[in-house]
């Protein structure tokens, strides 16, 4: 007997700027009060931020151990979880398969010491040991390798969601530290019984601080103690020792569309360029897109006029911003209107046509209005700028290039960052403020409510992350202070989760009481104490399927590929030519059927062809390996 949900969700980290910040200590609720009577996020958003006391909730004084469970689909991974001065869990690297590493700091009689576990060591031209994710050398997914970029130098976004799901358990007890992957111990080490995990109040980062993980995170569970049930756990379960659980199942209304911009500013001679003084404050899109966007964001059909999001009924009022910079020695109080929506330009720094990294920085801006009649969007940067801005506000940071980075997605939240342009008269993040949790918050489902914020404390650039092929080129004319904050929850980061994560723990018994007259069926499941708090995983009003499992059969072999020697095109000119069918004498079609039952060769006729042309619900995706794409066009070979 088994229960399987219909949906699950995950967060995709782009390897450029995505990160989840989990504030610790007393900052989890309201922030620190300033002498001006406002609340400031400087202790939360600083790159070295920490709480104001040592009794932090994820790991506090008196705890004898720590255990981190992670369900990830790496591409090819990186930093899974990190807390400065206490622990770091890594799985693979952003660019290439790599080892699983777990490092922890211990308080010993001889001072603080660091222990590092690693499944492989750097042998100069390769890894020596076990690396993840597993892939065939020179295979279809092996388009980039940091040790051989001359032959494998084509980073791609096409690996998105094509990697295996891994369940990682890394922990510390009073006697050892260890790492399990998919139920098997990969590396372990005994530690001195007199050692204790070092305590601190530093914040926790999932996916690193920005640009340090690429791939999907399905769930993260942190506990004070290791439990043997974690090794074979099918889903993340809360226990009495749980201190945090993130499943990324927040009820979000994601705008799924992507919009193409046609101009920045009003200078038609250079339509994709922005002014260096921050005075460019408009984005132009087609009037059709403007109507659709305004209609979607307001819930009202919009065909003409201007929708202003910085006033009622859309705005929640004004941010109070303190300015000590403009007139040193005196205080000015500025009012900056709130807006419910932000835009993220060039999310993930990917060329949508080639799916290669475009090395252009992503940029998050605040949407102030949409002129439905002209397609002109008025925007301002998420960054306050007391040097080049007007009353603290500035315009766009980056110019764009047609058909390379000229698109954006919607983030349903607002963010205002004060990262130091007011120095030396006011500290960084003195005025930083965030609102609208649905677009950037992640919910901790444990009783401790250590909720997180999707916020990047840094951006991977070719200077700071030279081994990261997704890193961007940061213009030397723009202050590096503006690199932070360019992320959020949107159409590319909030994704459907892996199907395995939809399976609930097997119950001891399952009884279905089928109703007549259109009423919902009643399903009763019984669990033992190995699945505590499992009821939290059944979302009200969500669909689920229930099955009997009369027997269990081991899979002895699987076939998921076949050589194709014949290609059929659509017959159109080269500019519009597309493949409509593949096959050949030795081609085995059975692994690629859209639904069952799979017919035998002598049973194929027009009826079976029509039946199998359409999937049950979702199309399956098959990859066609074309080596000349890499050798001739410097693209991923599929």
Image (cartoon, rainbow, N blue to C red):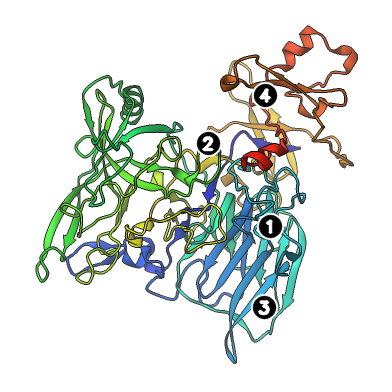
Q: Do labels 1 and 2 touch, CB within 8 Å?
A: no
Q: Residue at the location (24% across, 23% down)?
A: 373
Helix, strand or loop for disc 3: loop
Labels 4 and 3 touching (C-beta < 8 A)? no
Q: Earlier in the sequence, mark 2 or mark 4?
A: 4
The residue that disc 3 covers is 174
Q: How far is mark 4 from mark 3, CA to CA?
A: 51 Å
Residue 92 shows up from this direction: yes
Q: Tell me whether circle 1 and circle 3 mark residues in contact (CB < 8 Å).
A: no
Mark 4 secondary-structure assignment: loop
Residue 46 place in picture, x, y as percent: 37, 66
Q: What distance separates the C-alpha of mark 4 from that of mark 1?
A: 60 Å
The numbered disc on residue 540 is: 2
**556 left or right of 219 in image:** right
Q: Quadrant of the C terminus?
A: top right
Identify the residue under disc 4.
Answer: 514
Q: Residues within 10 Å of mark 2 (few under 14, many from 20)?
A: few
Can you say whether 366 is above or below 463 in the image? above
Above or below residue 254? Residue 603 is above
**Residue furthest toward the top?**
606
Question: Toward which corner of the image does residue 422 lie, by quadrant?
Answer: bottom left
Rounded to the nearest whole Å, what is the CA distance between mark 3 and mark 2?
Answer: 40 Å
Question: How much space separates mark 1 and mark 2, taking CA atoms?
Answer: 50 Å
What crowding class fits label 4: few (fewer than 14 Cα within 10 Å), some (14-19), or many (20 or more)?
Answer: few
Q: Earlier in the sequence, mark 1 or mark 3?
A: 1
């Amino acid at each position: 007997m088994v229960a399987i949900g219909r949906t699950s969700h995950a967060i995709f980290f782009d390897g450029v700027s995505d990160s989840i910040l989990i504030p610790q200590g007393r900052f989890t609720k309201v922030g620190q009060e300033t002498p001006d009577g406002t609340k400031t996020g400087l202790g939360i958003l600083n790159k070295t931020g920490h709480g104001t006391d040592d009794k932090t909730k994820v790991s506090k004084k008196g705890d004898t151990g720590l255990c981190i469970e992670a369900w990830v689909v790496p591409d090819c991974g990186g930093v899974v979880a990190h807390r400065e001065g206490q622990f770091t869990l890594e799985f693979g690297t952003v660019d290439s398969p790599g080892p699983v590493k777990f490092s922890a700091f211990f308080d010993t009689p001889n001072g603080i010491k660091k222990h590092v576990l690693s499944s492989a060591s750097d042998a100069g031209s390769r890894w020596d040991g076990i690396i993840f994710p597993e892939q065939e050398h020179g295979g279809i997914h092996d388009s980039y390798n940091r040790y051989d970029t001359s032959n494998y130098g084509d980073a791609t976004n096409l690996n998105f969601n094509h990697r295996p799901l891994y369940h990682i358990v890394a922990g510390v007890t009073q006697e050892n530290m260890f790492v399990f992957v998919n139920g098997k111990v990969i590396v372990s080490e005994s530690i001195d019984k007199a050692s204790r995990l070092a305590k601190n109040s530093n914040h926790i980062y999932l996916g690193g601080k920005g640009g340090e993980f690429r791939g999907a995170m399905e769930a993260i569970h942190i506990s004070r103690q290791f439990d043997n049930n974690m090794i074979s756990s099918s889903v993340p379960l809360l226990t009495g020792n749980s201190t945090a659980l993130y499943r990324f199942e927040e009820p979000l209304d994601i705008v799924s569309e992507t919009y193409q911009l046609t101009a920045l500013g009003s200078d038609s001679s250079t339509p994709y360029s922005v002014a260096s003084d921050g005075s460019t404050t408009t984005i132009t899109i087609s009037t059709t897109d403007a109507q659709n966007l305004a209609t979607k964001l307001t819930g009202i059909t919009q065909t003409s006029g201007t929708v202003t999001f910085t006033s009622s009924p859309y705005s929640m009022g004004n941010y109070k911003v303190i300015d000590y910079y403009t007139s040193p020695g005196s205080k000015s109080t500025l009012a900056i209107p709130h807006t419910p929506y932000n835009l993220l330009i060039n999310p993930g720094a990917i060329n949508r046509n080639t799916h290669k990294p475009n090395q252009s920085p992503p940029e998050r801006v605040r949407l102030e209005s949409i002129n439905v009649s002209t397609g002109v969007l008025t925007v301002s940067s998420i960054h306050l700028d007391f040097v080049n801005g007007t009353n603290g506000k500035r315009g766009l940071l980056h110019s764009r290039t047609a058909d390379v980075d000229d698109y954006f997605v919607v983030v349903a939240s607002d963010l205002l960052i004060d990262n130091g342009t007011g120095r030396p008269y006011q500290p960084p993040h003195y005025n930083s403020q965030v609102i609208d949790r649905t677009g950037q918050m992640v919910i901790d489902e444990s009783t401790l409510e250590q909720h997180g914020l999707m916020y990047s404390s840094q951006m991977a650039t070719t200077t700071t992350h030279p081994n990261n092929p997704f890193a961007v080129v940061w213009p030397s004319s723009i202050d590096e202070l503006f690199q932070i904050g360019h992320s959020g929850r949107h159409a590319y980061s909030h994704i459907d989760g892996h199907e395995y994560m939809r399976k609930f723990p097997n119950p001891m018994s399952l009884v279905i009481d089928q109703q007549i007259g259109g009423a919902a069926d009643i399903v009763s499941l019984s669990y033992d104490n190995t699945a505590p708090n499992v009821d939290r995983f059944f979302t009200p009003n969500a669909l689920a399927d229930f099955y009997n499992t009369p027997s269990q059969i081991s899979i002895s072999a699987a076939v998921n590929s076949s050589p194709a020697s014949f290609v059929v095109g659509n017959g159109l000119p080269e500019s519009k030519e597309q493949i409509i069918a593949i096959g050949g004498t030795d081609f085995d079609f059975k692994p690629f059927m859209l639904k069952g039952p799979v017919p035998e060769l002598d049973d194929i006729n027009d009826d079976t062809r029509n039946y199998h042309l359409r999937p049950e619900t979702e199309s399956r995706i098959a990859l066609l390996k074309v080596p000349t794409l890499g050798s001739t066009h410097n693209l991923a070979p599929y």
